[in-house]
Image (cartoon, rainbow, N blue to C red):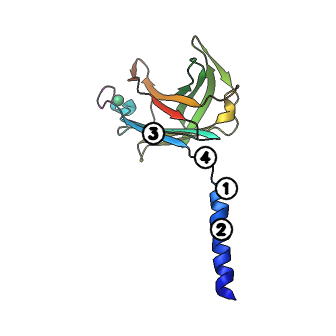
Amino acid sequence: MRRPLLTLAAAAAALVSLTAAPAHAESGHKDTTVGDAPAAIDITAIDATNAVRRVKIKVTVPGLTTAGTFTFGYEGRTYDGMAIDVRHRGSGASAKAFRCGEESCAKVACRGLQARWDVAGHVVSVSVPQRCYPGPVPETWSINAHADLGKEYDSDGTRLRLRRG
Ligand SMILES: [Ca+2]
């Protein structure tokens, strides 16, 4: 009796994982220009995932210190979207969310916003609930990242166009 039960359980588990699987989140990666900014803010790669519930964006900065501000942005086709400013604070990161139109940005509340600043791992990242965008979420986000250090900045216009999974 044990064997058929186990087989049934395995089949049931397989069925659950099939039906429970969310739509495939679209992910992307782009290498960006190396050496076009001071090392502490020189972004060399961007990775992002546009999932049903969250947008996740990560930049690789080999010379990362605790200095500078990183801004993660995503927008639809109408130049309307979100920007997340991240700075180092204490032993981690602090993040603020803004809704941005073509002309300006306004701070918005964004419960569940997470930011990580990992000096040893050379990575700064954010995870933003899609619901923080105060409107219908578009099918595709155009995702980018920018860093600045006072008068100097790194922004090479790299964009990842990702459909929401
Ligand atoms: Ca760069």
Q: Which mark is residue 28?
A: 3
- Disc 3 residue type? Gly
The answer to whether the residues at label 1 and label 4 have Cβ atoms under 8 Å apart is: no
Neighbourhood count class around disc 1 (C-alpha, 10 Å): few under 14, some 14–19, many 20 upward: few
Q: Earlier in the sequence, mark 3 or mark 4?
A: 4
Find numbered disc 3 in the image and state the secondary structure of the residue it sits on.
strand
Q: Is mark 4 within 8 Å of ligand 1?
A: no
Label 4 sits on residue: 23
Q: Quadrant of ligand 1?
A: top left
- Disc 4 residue type? Ala
Residue 27, position in %: x, y? 49, 41
Q: Which mark is residue 20?
A: 1
- The residue that appears at 35% across and 40% down in the rendered structure is 62
- Disc 1 residue type? Ala
Residue 102, picture quadrant:
top right
Q: Nearer the viewer, mark 3 or mark 2?
A: 2
Residue 3, position in %: x, y? 64, 85
Q: CA distance from mark 1 to mark 3?
A: 23 Å
Q: Earlier in the sequence, mark 1 or mark 3?
A: 1
In the picture shown, does residue 106 fall above or below 109?
above
Q: Which residues are magenta?
A: 33-38
Q: Quadrant of the C terminus?
A: top right
- The residue that appears at 55% across and 42% down in the rendered structure is 92
